[in-house]
């Protein structure tokens, strides 16, 4: 059988690539043969990319539209085009609506929703020129089923799911899909319980929402992104694929 997840010859940009899901994805894609540009606001991305054998590690805040346009052009020049994009950069915020400031709300939306818009917009001309091009937006189970004290996060991820579906209609035959993770063991996830008065109890409370009661590894999440970025999912576009240990289907 063909190795449908082989990425040899593909030219892929991954945001949020200094940590967590984005990093594991970018590293896996290099191992699967792709040329990969790692992008992050964290300057550590250069070291991470170089250690993994990436084509480049570029620093940018995805909320900054003009800087994103410049960096995506730089990535395309380094790779000789772009035929794959993964938007994994994101932030979380656990706060009640009355505690949340408008600045916090705006920043979360600027990163989690405007960020993918900026990157997709800058990459679209390159993706349209390529054959079998893909975009994967890392949304969340929180974009499918709500969580308390996460109005901004849930709104950003639900917005990203519908952005993905609308963009799939516009960019076809470029395939555009969303991945909706549950809990993946990353710094972002750990922040959601480690500062609670009783972190162990809070972790248990979170795990109780899931049918499979463990946090997945970033590598497990990366394999779902690989599926959506490769020929393995060649007839899928406009989907919001939950990889969420069973939280959101019931
Ligand atoms: N970990 C989970 O349980 C989980 C669950 C559902 C969805 N997600 C989503 O997965 C994505 C990746 O999260 P993760 O868990 O790997 O977190 P992480 O914190 O390990 O990695 C996120 C990366 O994004 C980068 N980043 C943040 N803001 C940025 C910005 N403005 N510009 C550029 N880079 C920026 C960070 O520097 C970091 O390297 C996020 O979009 C998150 O919402 C995570």
Image (tube, rainbow, N blue to C red):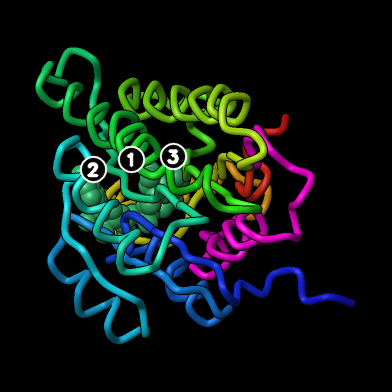
On the image, the x and y values in percent for residue 244 come to: 60, 47
Callout 1 secondary element: helix
Mark found first going from the N terminus, 2 or 1: 2
Q: Magenta stretch containing residue 124, yes or no?
A: no
What residue is at 63 percent from the left and 53 percent from the top?
Answer: 131
From what the image shows, is residue 39 above or below residue 143? below
From what the image shows, is residue 7 above or below residue 204? below
Callout 3 secondary element: helix
Residue denoted by label 1: 122
Q: On the rendered image, what quadrant is the C terminus found in?
A: top right
Mark found first going from the N terminus, 3 or 2: 2
Image disc number at residue 124:
3
- Front one among 218 and 27: 27
Callout 2 secondary element: helix
What residue is at 66 percent from the left and 60 percent from the top?
Answer: 230
On the image, the x and y values in percent for residue 165 come to: 59, 26
Mark 1 residue crowding within 10 angstroms, few (<14) / some (14–19) / many (20+) = some
Q: Magenta stretch containing residue 229, yes or no?
A: yes
Residue denoted by label 2: 69
What residue is at 12 percent from the left and 16 percent from the top?
Answer: 102
């Amino acid at each position: 059988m063909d190795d449908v997840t082989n990425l040899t010859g593909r030219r892929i940009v991954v945001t949020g690539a200094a940590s967590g899901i984005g990093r594991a994805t970018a590293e896996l894609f290099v191992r699967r043969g792709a040329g990969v540009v790692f992008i992050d606001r964290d300057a550590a991305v250069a070291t991470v990319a170089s250690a993994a054998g990436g084509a480049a590690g570029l620093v940018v805040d995805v909320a900054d539209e003009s800087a994103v346009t410049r960096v995506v052009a730089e990535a395309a020049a380094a790779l000789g085009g772009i035929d794959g994009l993964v938007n994994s950069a994101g932030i979380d915020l656990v706060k009640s609506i009355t505690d949340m400031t408008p600045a916090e709300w705006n920043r979360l939306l600027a990163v989690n929703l405007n960020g993918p818009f900026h990157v997709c917009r800058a990459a679209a001309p390159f993706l349209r020129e390529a054959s079998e091009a893909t975009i994967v937006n890392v949304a969340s189970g929180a974009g499918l089923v709500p969580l308390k004290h996460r109005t901004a996060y849930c709104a950003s991820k639900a917005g990203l799911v519908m952005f993905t579906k609308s963009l799939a209609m516009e960019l076809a035959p470029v395939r555009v899909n969303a991945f909706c993770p549950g809990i993946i063991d990353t710094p972002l996830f750990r922040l959601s319980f480690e500062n609670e008065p009783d972190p162990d109890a809070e972790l248990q409370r979170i795990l109780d929402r899931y049918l499979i009661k463990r946090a997945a590894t970033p590598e497990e999440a990366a394999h779902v992104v690989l599926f959506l970025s490769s020929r393995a999912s060649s007839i899928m576009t406009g989907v919001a694929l939950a990889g969420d240990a069973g939280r959101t289907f019931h």
